[in-house]
Amino acid sequence: MAIPQTNDTGRRPFIGVEPFDASYGAGFRADEEDEHTVECRVVEDGGHFRIHQPRDAGPPTRLCFVDGVRRTEAHLTRTNPQGETITGIAGAWGAGAVLIGEDGPAEIGHVEIRRAVIFSGGEQVRLHPHPGGWRWTALSVDSEEPHAASQHLQRLMRDTEAAIADHLFAEGWLVVFDGPLHSIRRSRRTPVVGYVKTHHRRTLAVEHWQVVPGLLVGERTSIFAMKDDRYACYIRVGDPGPWAGPWAGIARLEVPASSGSAQAIATVDRAASWLPTFASAPHRDARAPVNLAPVARLEQHLHHLIGDSRLALRAVREAVMQHNRDEEAV
């Protein structure tokens, strides 16, 4: 069952085109009947859901954006002498940060690039390093579900992002973490903002959910509590164009609940005032405007460092052939 939505007319339904390039999937996929739907409690404005227009405030003097990328480079199988086959993947991931200090241009730093062979069923397979410089860590997951290895690759990327973010917290940077704050330590009191671009489930009562598409650029909603560890609100960071759907250009901000509601309100209020200045442009980014320009630059850099996917696949194939020859020689 589709969730009722509003549009700029407020009166009739219409067709919108997702601003995300189709290869990235859809930015809006929430379903009213989703078993994960949670109607979060509004904790600002006396429990009334409202739209706020934050005062203009410049970005902090030590601001950074943390993000990561991942890539499945080969799907693998391993068959034992009894004919039983398990599945796995060879994958790569990377993470880093864009640091914007008080003086000088933005810089990319704290970059980590890693590769692994991940098999299901608790099996580990070690591949010899490839002469071209390709190396893989041997990992495994207990589950035999088809997507278990890919999900583990996603967790590895998130854990690497969180470690980088945690290091930058300690150095006094305000971190914008591209994605939800699942991987960030729950007790974190240092300012951190989770930035969520896609909307996979409804998080508010229907009457509140219908208000969100009415946000103008730079406006935010009242904050609400997500479980016990995060406060959140929705903001519109940019105008995606007249052909877009009502949720295009909208992101969810998350902050740790451990900071307290007053600090959370101050953080999202200030962030909502300067985040739109980092919104990407359609001619530069297939996910404009909601994918922030520093994040897009970082992703491009990380993809470059991960290397050519065709060369990666060739390296995996040659390493697998060498592994099989070694097994036969035993």
Image (cartoon, rainbow, N blue to C red):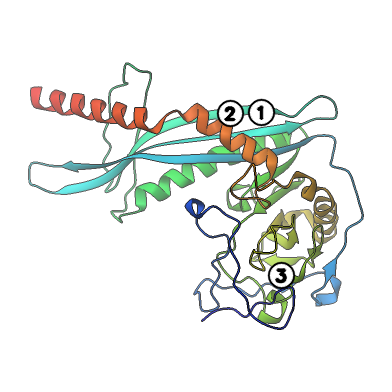
Percent x, y for residue 55? 92, 55
Percent x, y for residue 39? 64, 75
Q: Residue at x 78, y 34 (%)?
A: 172
Residue type marked 2? Val
Q: Which residue is mark 3?
A: 213
Q: Which marked residue is nearer to the observer: mark 2 or mark 1?
A: 1
Question: Mark 1: which secondary structure?
Answer: strand
The circle drawn on residue 111 is 2
Q: Which residue is mark 1?
A: 108
11 or 101: nearer the viewer: 11
Q: Quadrant of residue 321?
A: top left
Q: Which marked residue is nearer to the observer: mark 3 or mark 1?
A: 3
Other residues around mark 3 within 10 Å, as few (<14) / some (14–19) / many (≥20): many
Percent x, y for residue 120? 29, 47
Residue type marked 3? Pro
Q: Is residue 249 above or below residue 172?
A: below
Other residues around mark 1 within 10 Å, as few (<14) / some (14–19) / many (≥20): some
Q: Is residue 288 above or below residue 127?
A: below
Q: Earlier in the sequence, mark 3 or mark 1?
A: 1
CA distance separating discs 3 and 1: 34 Å
Q: Quadrant of the C terminus?
A: top left
Question: Mark 2: which secondary structure?
Answer: strand
Percent x, y for residue 14? 62, 76
Q: Which marked residue is nearer to the observer: mark 3 or mark 2?
A: 3
Q: Residue at x 47, y 30 (%)?
A: 306
Residue type marked 1? Ile
